[in-house]
Image (cartoon, grey):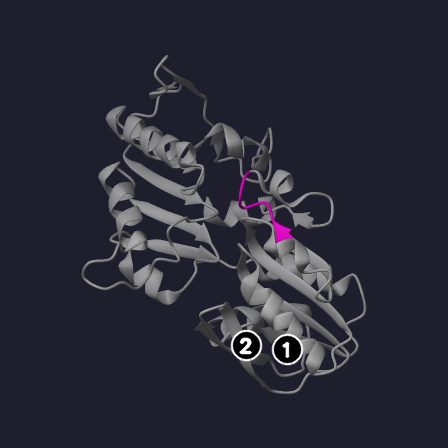
Amino acid sequence: MIVFSIPQHRGLLPAEPREQPQLTLGRCRFGSFPDGELWVEVEDRVEGGECAVLGSLAPPHEQALSVLLLAHTLKRAGARRVLALLPYLGYGRQDAAGPSQSLGAAWAGAMLQAAGVDELVTIDLHSDAAATCLPLPVASLSPASLFATELRRGSARGLCVVAPDEGAIDRCQAVADAAGIEAPIAHLRKRRGAGGVVQSALIGEVGERAVLVDDIIDTGGTLLSACAELRRAGVGEISIMATHGTFSGDRWRKLPAAGAQRIVVTDSVPDVRDRAGAGVEVLSITPLLPAALA
């Protein structure tokens, strides 16, 4: 398989994939015309072969267009199969909609399919509902091993894993199992009011130390509310581990004051370090990629 990357994601690939000699790093050039219109040129022969496009279908939207244009170019150049490896699938949170509302997950899948993508691999897809919206085969890789490694660096004594809502319970269980944490998963019930997300009840027991596990930190509203509820329950040490860090606005910056002593995300979003700054730990998703490209 030949792996091509949009410029923002090239740092995720090793210069020489020694562990997988069947992989080749493809060469391509991106550019734009004076009016901003994108172009791409594939510099390797791909006719009859399998190719992967590593990128992101998310804002800034130039990245999404680059993925689509590269996939289309590879198919035009004769690639037999094109796999889209998109660590963060933007629009995946739009997984339910009324008849007059946009269904972003379905739209994203339709765009990928139209561009020539045969299969999609992502990391921590938002929900099972999002998967059913996609019109092409999709595999969602779990970041549980990455988070578990970080948790095992310290003491797991008295540590409980908490889901910020019912939808995150399976995600939390995967992390707890990988880290060898036997305490039952606690979770919060979430409702949306006029002022935003509010956690209405804590289900399960918590101790002195808790780690909140979620798929995304965007504005941080859900996690702020979760931290407040955990502190009311007597939790003294709170950590947050989230797969994708989009870090919109400034509200999420209140998390440390709300009790979050540690915030950990992955580099699934290309510019996460610029968005988050020095106070957020960023884990590399590179160890997860070989399995996706096997």
Q: Amino acid at mark 1?
A: Glu
- Local SS, label 2: strand
Q: Magenta part of the protein: which range?
A: 265-270
User: Which residue sits at x=40%, y=42%?
Assistant: 57
User: Which residue sits at x=59%, y=30%?
Assistant: 16
Q: Nearer the viewer, residue 202 or 23?
A: 202
- Residue at the far bottom: name it: 204
User: Which residue sits at x=48%, y=30%?
Assistant: 24
- Residue at the far left: name it: 99
Q: Which mark is residue 199?
A: 2
Choose the circle earlier in sequence order: 1 or 2.
Answer: 2
How busy is the neighbourhood of tag 1: few (under 14 within 10 Å), some, or many (20 plus)?
Answer: some
Q: Nearer the viewer, residue 284 or 290?
A: 284
Q: Is residue 1 visible?
A: no
Q: Main secondary structure of the magenta part?
A: loop
Q: Nearer the viewer, residue 216 or 158?
A: 216
- Local SS, label 1: helix
Residue 23, above or below 120: above
Residue 230, above or below 283: below
Residue 206 is drawn in which quadrant?
bottom right
Q: Based on the picture, tell me whether residue 142 belongs to the magenta stretch.
A: no
Q: Which mark is residue 229?
A: 1
Q: Is residue 121 visible?
A: yes
Is residue 92 found left or right of 264 in the rendered image?
Answer: left
